[in-house]
């Protein structure tokens, strides 16, 4: 399955791209995250230089998620996939991958387009897909709001 979201941010790409390598999210706890959905607290590179093959770790309210960077073109394009997690739902996750594109707009603005591909596995695959989709809708919204906040601070 795939989910796509976009946001236009009042900052140039070079103010946004570094946030994919290191960022601290705000302390809000939107309602959706109070029901078990892991909310990102911070993300940073734990192995490598942020290029292809580097490992990015996101600390969440439910543990950690490690992602391998599969594509990195500074200020333009960033992609990664989940490789490890201690989240309780991990055994039901088939795959999760994100592809993020930055498109410069007029007046030093940037359109951020995020595509998440995902699938569940196991006996509960079908309901798992629906739960994942709802979770990613909220996760995209929360991340977009934080990228806007951090890039314009």
Image (cartoon, rainbow, N blue to C red):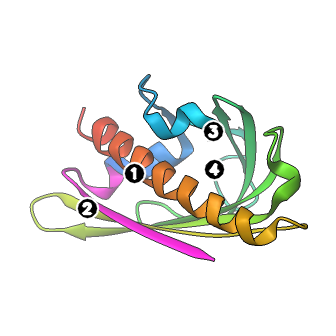
What quarter of the picture does the N terminus occupy?
bottom right
Q: Nearer the viewer's eye, disc 1 or disc 2?
A: 1
Look at discs 4 and 1 and give the one toward the viewer: 1
Crowding around mark 3 (Cα neighbors within 10 Å: few <14, some 14 to 19, many 20+) is many
Earlier-in-chain disc, 4 versus 1: 4
Q: CA distance from mark 4 to mark 3?
A: 23 Å
The residue carrying pointer 1 sits among few (fewer than 14), some (14 to 19) or many (20 or more) residues within 10 Å by Cα, namely: few
The residue lying toward the viewer, choosing from 27 and 80, is: 27
Q: x, y (%) of residue 98? A: 59, 64
**What residue is shown with label 4?**
50
The residue shown at (64%, 33%) is 60
Q: List x then y, in percent, for residue 55.
A: 74, 48
Neighbour tally class for label 2: few under 14, some 14-19, many 20 plus, Cα within 10 Å: many
- Above/below status of 144 relative to 34: below
Asked if the residue at tag 3 contacts the one at tag 4, i.e. Cβ–Cβ closer than 8 Å, the answer is no
Residue position marked by numbered label 2 in the rendering: 110
Bounds of the magenta segment: 1-14
Labels 4 & 2 near each other (Cβ < 8 A): no
> In this view of the protein, can residue 24 be seen by the observer?
yes
Examine the image and state in which quarter residue 127 appears: bottom right
Disc 3 is placed on an element classified as: loop
CA distance separating discs 1 and 2: 16 Å
Q: Which mark is residue 21?
A: none
Q: Is residue 38 above or below residue 24?
A: below
Q: Is residue 51 magenta?
A: no
Task: Report the side of 97 relative to 92 (left or right).
Answer: left
Q: Nearer the viewer, residue 117 or 17?
A: 117
Q: Which residue is mark 1?
A: 141
User: Which image quadrant is residue 123 in?
Assistant: bottom right
Q: Nearer the viewer, residue 123 or 95?
A: 123
């Amino acid at each position: 399955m795939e989910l796509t979201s976009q946001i236009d941010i009042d900052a140039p790409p070079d103010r946004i791209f570094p946030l994919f390598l290191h960022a601290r999210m705000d302390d809000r706890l939107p309602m959706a995250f109070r029901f078990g959905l892991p909310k990102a607290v911070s993300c940073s590179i734990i192995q490598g230089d942020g290029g292809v093959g580097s490992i990015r770790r996101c600390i969440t309210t439910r543990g950690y998620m490690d992602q391998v960077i599969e594509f990195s073109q500074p200020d333009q394009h960033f992609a990664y996939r989940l490789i490890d997690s201690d989240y309780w739902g991990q055994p039901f996750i088939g795959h999760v991958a994100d592809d993020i594109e930055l498109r410069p707009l007029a007046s030093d603005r940037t359109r951020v387009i995020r595509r998440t591909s995902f699938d569940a596995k196991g006996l509960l695959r079908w309901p798992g897909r629906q739960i994942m989709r709802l979770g990613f809708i909220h996760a995209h919204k929360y991340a977009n709001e934080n990228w806007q906040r951090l890039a314009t601070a």
